[in-house]
Image (cartoon, grey):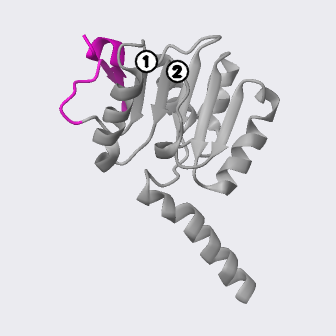
């Protein structure tokens, strides 16, 4: 009984504490993934950044389209799951264990994120600092950036173009 409690408590901590930094783990469904990648116009050779890579489903789908993907994930269990799921594409997909707010984000063409509403202004400011004017696009699942009009909206996904926003 103690082992069950310890396992349950450990999983609760691993899956729950991420809310302090972004959003809880929720799997991105295949249809949502395809919409996000279509909005980003992902094709071979594109660089995609996934902030909160979860179980690796978005990274895997982008790699299948030929993209080079960098993902960040706080939950070490999900990092292992992502790396296993993306093993076949390990030359294209790199999943890092850590807090993306403190990471050096690589050059990228597109960013995918599912964050809570309270973090969207911070995300916007980070992207402006790092990518404004550099042909970088953002797809946010479920949450809009306050005071910015998305370029496109489809299936709960909001597309922002930071090259256009900087002009």
Residue 108 is labelled as 2
Label 2 – label 1 distance at C-alpha = 7 Å
Magenta residue check for 164: yes
Say which residue appears at 44% left-offset and 58% top-offset: 19
Figure disc tally: 2
Give above or below for 9 relative to 68. Answer: below
Residue 79 is labelled as none
Magenta residue check for 27: no
Say which residue appears at 60% left-offset and 36% top-offset: 71
Q: Which residue is mark 1?
A: 136
Pointer 2 and pointer 1: residues touching (CB < 8 Å)?
yes
Residue nearer the viewer, 64 or 34: 64
Q: Which residues are magenta?
A: 146-167
- Image side of residue 94 versus residue 9, left or right: right
Residue nearer the viewer, 125 or 74: 125
* Image quadrant assignment for residue 135: top left
Q: Residues within 10 Å of mark 1 (few under 14, many from 20)?
A: many
Say which residue appears at 27% left-offset and 15% top-offset: 166
Q: Residue at the bottom extreme?
A: 1
x and y, in percent, of residue 47 in the image: 58, 19
């Amino acid at each position: 009984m103690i082992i069950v409690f310890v396992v349950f408590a450990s999983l609760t901590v691993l899956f729950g504490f991420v809310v302090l930094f972004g959003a809880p783990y929720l799997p991105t469904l295949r249809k949502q993934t395809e919409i996000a990648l279509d909005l980003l116009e992902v094709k071979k050779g594109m660089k995609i950044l996934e902030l909160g890579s979860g179980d690796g489903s978005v990274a895997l789908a982008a790699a299948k389209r030929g993209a080079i993907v960098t993902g960040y994930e706080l939950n070490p269990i999900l990092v292992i799951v992502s790396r296993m799921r993306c093993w076949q594409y390990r030359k294209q997909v790199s999943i890092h264990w850590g807090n993306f707010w403190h990471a050096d984000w690589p050059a990228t063409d597109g960013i995918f994120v599912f964050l809570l509403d309270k973090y969207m202004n911070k995300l916007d400011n980070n992207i402006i600092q790092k990518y404004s004017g550099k042909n970088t696009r953002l797809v946010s699942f479920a949450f809009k950036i306050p005071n910015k009009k998305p370029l496109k909206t489809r299936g709960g996904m909001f597309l922002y173009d930071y090259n256009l926003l900087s002009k």
